Image (cartoon, coloured by chain):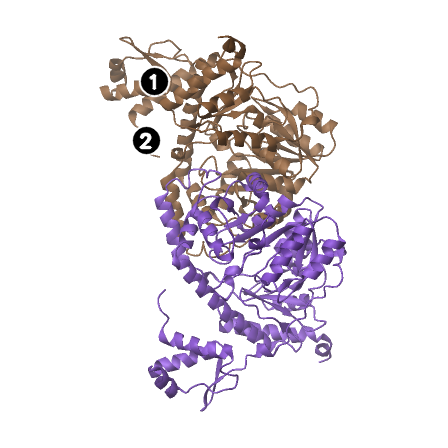
Chain colours: A brown, B purple
Amino acid sequence: MSPLPRYRQLAQHYTQAIRDGTLQPGERLPSLRELMKLHGVSLSTALQVCRTLEGEGFAEARERSGYFVRQPRRLAMVPMDEPAADRPPDPAQFVGIHQTVSDFVTRRRWGEVHLDLSSARASPELYPADALRAAMMRSLRQRPQLLTQASPSRARTPFREAVARRALRAGMHLAPEDVLPTNGCIEALNLALRAVAQPGDTVAVESPTFYGLLQALESLGMRALEIPTSPQTGLSLEALELALRTYERIRAVVVVPHLQNPLGSVMPDTHKQRLVQLCRAHGAALIEDDTYTELLDADAVPRAVQSFDTEGGVIHCASMHKVLAPGLRLGWIHAGRWHARVEMLKFAQTRMNEELSQWAVGEFMATSAYDRHLRRLRETLRLQRERTADAIAAHFPAGTRINLPPGGLQLWVELPPGTQAQALFDAALEEHILIAPGTLFSNSARCDGFVRINCGLPWSPALATALKRLGELAHAVAAPRERRAA
Amino acid sequence: MSPLPRYRQLAQHYTQAIRDGTLQPGERLPSLRELMKLHGVSLSTALQVCRTLEGEGFAEARERSGYFVRQPRRLAMVPMDEPAADRPPDPAQFVGIHQTVSDFVTRRRWGEVHLDLSSARASPELYPADALRAAMMRSLRQRPQLLTQASPSRARTPFREAVARRALRAGMHLAPEDVLPTNGCIEALNLALRAVAQPGDTVAVESPTFYGLLQALESLGMRALEIPTSPQTGLSLEALELALRTYERIRAVVVVPHLQNPLGSVMPDTHKQRLVQLCRAHGAALIEDDTYTELLDADAVPRAVQSFDTEGGVIHCASMHKVLAPGLRLGWIHAGRWHARVEMLKFAQTRMNEELSQWAVGEFMATSAYDRHLRRLRETLRLQRERTADAIAAHFPAGTRINLPPGGLQLWVELPPGTQAQALFDAALEEHILIAPGTLFSNSARCDGFVRINCGLPWSPALATALKRLGELAHAVAAPRERRAA
């Protein structure tokens, strides 16, 4: 990895000190002259340090007084409540997401969108386009038959090897043959669900959860039982246990252990272990969606849920879509004791994945450039999440609550009591801003007061203005009576 | 298109005359001297003409007498019987293909395969590897964000445009938006089936049919009702009508109207029209699998079944897998009145297809190089089918029957009465030759005396030897008692 420029190193040094609390909000930062002396750098480097700290929201310039540590407003926000887990979930709300999503899509088409904050998606410029393209071209040159020869069903590709190698870091022991490439994580989840459950069966899911999962379940004729989920630690094990005891025929449990979508929660290892035991005890398959793990701020990789399992009872699904190449549909599944059944279902549904992207991506993943890319991506997303959270803290009405997750692409925002996310969605769309209303994340009404805001776009004046305007709209929809009276 | 060399032009001239019957088997061909005079060519060109005709099986050299039109032995073979269509199909045999396919796969893994004649697949060298690769590289260069930007759900790609344009030739009127790219034709078929039928429903299929369809149905929990099918004209409409009247809940009918797999039959237009009427009258969706049409020997494109429909009741599925790029999983579906439902199911199952191959393949399809490739491919496959048929006619036991289809990748071979295809499969595998036993093409026992032989491999001495050996093995398994007595 090429060393950071000196000014970035120094900016990181001060950022760290602010994070650690060594430098407190309101405290004066060293002056330009002091920085030059302290670190033996030029004036222009010292200036770059201060401007970087300011740009990233850690410092503010006060006229004639220099730079001061900024009070991140988000720290003053109240975190969300933990979910109540003392009663079984409401079985009346098993299905219905197709209609909700259709409504969303229809409304979106009516409106003209200038700024899309609705998806969990990073900008293309955050991904290594040139390196990926070079890798694709190399594979095309080196393997002339990739386009004209059908892939044998058990082709050993660099992708399968790279996934197996990297899985070691999460405590998993896979052979490349255990890694079955799929058309994105969503195909992996579909295959997992079809392997372990039948139409009519009930599957426990986190609540809130991403609508893709609810759609997959509904289109497979399965019923989603929504389990309360903590914004900090993920799926409530108490609530799950209660549900497993109350309902028969819960065939599977689906979890996103790291950076759950939309909450951003991260499940502690002790929970993972208990979750595996619980599912085993009740004969439920455990399906782990590992899409976001590489977007965690820390360099250390937490253990996969699968790594706590010894009986092939956990199906592990993931993809390269959010972390490396959003333009490719390249995911994978490790299906434990359902491997043969999943392989058969995959063959019957879409045949084996094509090989070209497996060669290119697999070879890229085996280089240090992949980890360098991930570090840059994480750092950029962290800054964008923090600035977005700051803007929400500054502009949204009192009573708005957020949790700042330790990684990932989005913020889950709880609007003040009584505020309907749908009203904010409609008002925002009129001003060409698209957000994801909470209604998309549950078949029940429990998320009607939430919105999900994407943090994948590079910070810009237009984005800052849009978030400010979104806050004003939130004020308006939060107090519709006063507004009408005016 | 670059003009053919003179000797190929002349060879085609004589081939045509033999096909037309202008020159009869046994008749003497012009001598070398006569060819030189007649066509004003050199001795070496005249010699090349004769050798080409000999190489392609149209002429044989007799010592000191010159070249004679050869009696193609396959013409002496008895064509297969038409199926009986006067009683409803046997509903006892709805499912079971998974076990049959698993047995096949397991046995195949035991054996060491040197020559695979089991698939319906052409050699990679029959596809335009360089041109495809160049098209991919051009797309990668011209569209830097193809790998790093998620495809919008309604991206208008050159592939969708090229498919819509070419569909005109088959009498279909599609907008590019109607063409939904899929992961191969098999995903298109899965989506079509899921859109129109539920688990437990019955779907009428041709019998025999390709095991991929039977697998898809079984894995979706649907029941395949096998309708007798003519090796000449495809699905028996009498048998289908009887079935539609006898059974309730036949939700869909799946047909391969052109070059049916494995029969190679081609449905006449009058049948297509009646089929559309029949399905409409009985409220059954009609699913058309159009995978092989471009492999028909003729340059003229027959009308699609869909082109006879005016009410959105036909779902059209196809792919580029057999005709252009076996290394890509690029198919498409036009779902008629189920378009919105199919789009939703596609999104829930695998999201939109990635765009890269849609750009590369779409732009290639828009050039004249695509039609040149198709003409070459058809011509090569025709010769390979004819030589394979000749070899079977020469070496297989009396009572063997084949129909020579007007295009495509394979021959469907009926072994003499009482011969078990499974026995021939086992004996061939011991000698490292893989064939597809008829058992794979039906849930009933009605195809146990058939094998499917791939004709996609370039003719070679090894292939000739293998087909000869296969004939000897067929003799042996056809007369096991005599053999044991010896």
Q: What residue do we see at 24% from left, 21% from top?
A: A44
- Residue that protrudes farthest toward the front in the picture: B310
Q: Which chain is mark 1 on?
A: A
Residue A459, placed above or below residue B175: above
The three-letter amino acid code for the residue at tag 1 is: Glu
Residue indicated by mark 1:
A54
Disc 2 versus disc 1: distance between alpha carbons? Answer: 22 Å
- Along the line of sight, which residue is nearer the eye, B366 or B402? B366
The three-letter amino acid code for the residue at tag 2 is: Pro
* Picture coordinates of residue A58, whole percent (x, y): 37, 17
Q: Which chain is mark 2 on?
A: A
* Picture coordinates of residue B241, whole percent (x, y): 71, 57
Residue B9, placed above or below residue A205: below
* Picture coordinates of residue A129, whole percent (x, y): 38, 39
Which quadrant is the N terminus of chain B positioned in? bottom left
- Along the line of sight, which residue is nearer the eye, A209 or B359? B359
Classify mark 1: helix, strand or loop: helix
